Amino acid sequence: MLSELLAHIGKFVNLNTREENLLTEHFTNTGLNKKEYLLKEGQVCKHNYFVAQGCLRMFFINEKGTEQITQFAIENWWINDTMSLIKQTPSEFSIQAVEDSKVFCLHKDAQQILYDKVPSFQQYMHSVEQHAHAAAQMRMKYLYSYSKEEHYINFIQRFPEFAQRVPQYMLASFLGFTPEYLSELRKKLT
């Protein structure tokens, strides 16, 4: 059932059969239809979510009432509202399925149990969190260092799968553009 997750963990650390069984006991799974919410603003985030299939987005509503996408998660990526998860406070973000998705859920209490019983799982999560932090740092660099055109070109070159999977208005939101600007930019570059 957790073969996608166990395969991903196996790329970072080695697990024995007992450890794999412990992991299997502590994860739940859920299927999401396109546009279904995993977390809504105001709810407390109690889980880390691993995307086994599909695509999710995390967003907030800005002061103008516009959705601002801060993160996407596709297969083998994790997603959560970290501040809400750590502090157990209401989330300022929503997490929603962009397409039909299959997600494995790890409750924050179960995660701590697994850290105690399967130290290599904690090593894995630490590595995943480091990669996510590094990606967030690079995203900030691109936002401040590149022109909008350079930012778009760099993103499309690094993540071509998003150009096919994510609606253009969502890509525009993630990049900090209006949909109209992205449309003009795409026409200019073709």
Image (cartoon, rainbow, N blue to C red):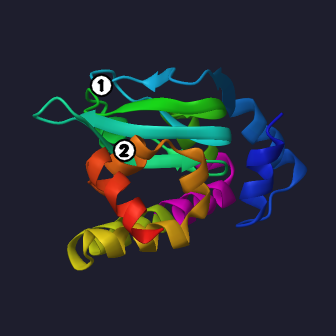
Tell me which corner region of the image, top left, top right, bottom left or bottom right, holds residue 27: top right
Total marks in image: 2
Tell me which corner region of the image, top left, top right, bottom left or bottom right, holds residue 107: top right
The secondary element bearing badge 2 is classed as: helix
Q: Sort mark 1 into few (<14), some (14-19) or many (20+) by Cα contacts within 10 Å.
A: some
Q: Return the x and y of residue 29 as percentages of the image width and height.
A: 68, 27
Q: Nearer the viewer, residue 61 or 184?
A: 184
Residue 100 versus residue 15 in the image, above or below: above
- The answer to whether residue 113 is visible is no
- The answer to whether residue 151 is visible is yes
Q: Return the x and y of residue 160 as percentages of the image width and height.
A: 59, 63
- Mark in the foreground, 2 or 1: 1
Q: Nearer the viewer, residue 100 or 116?
A: 100
**Cα gap from disc 2 to disc 1, whole angstroms:** 13 Å
Query: Which residue is at the far left?
Result: 63
Q: Nearer the viewer, residue 39 or 125?
A: 39
Q: Sort mark 2 into few (<14), some (14-19) or many (20+) by Cα contacts within 10 Å.
A: some
Looking at marks 2 and 1 on the same chain, the residue that comes earlier in the sequence is marked by 1
Residue in view at x 49 percent, y 44 percent: 79
The secondary element bearing badge 1 is classed as: loop
Q: Is residue 117 magenta?
A: yes
The residue tagged 1 is: 41
Q: Return the x and y of residue 18 as percentages of the image width and height.
A: 85, 46
Q: Return the x and y of residue 50 as percentages of the image width and height.
A: 61, 42
The residue tagged 2 is: 82
Residue 163 versus residue 188 in the image, above or below: above
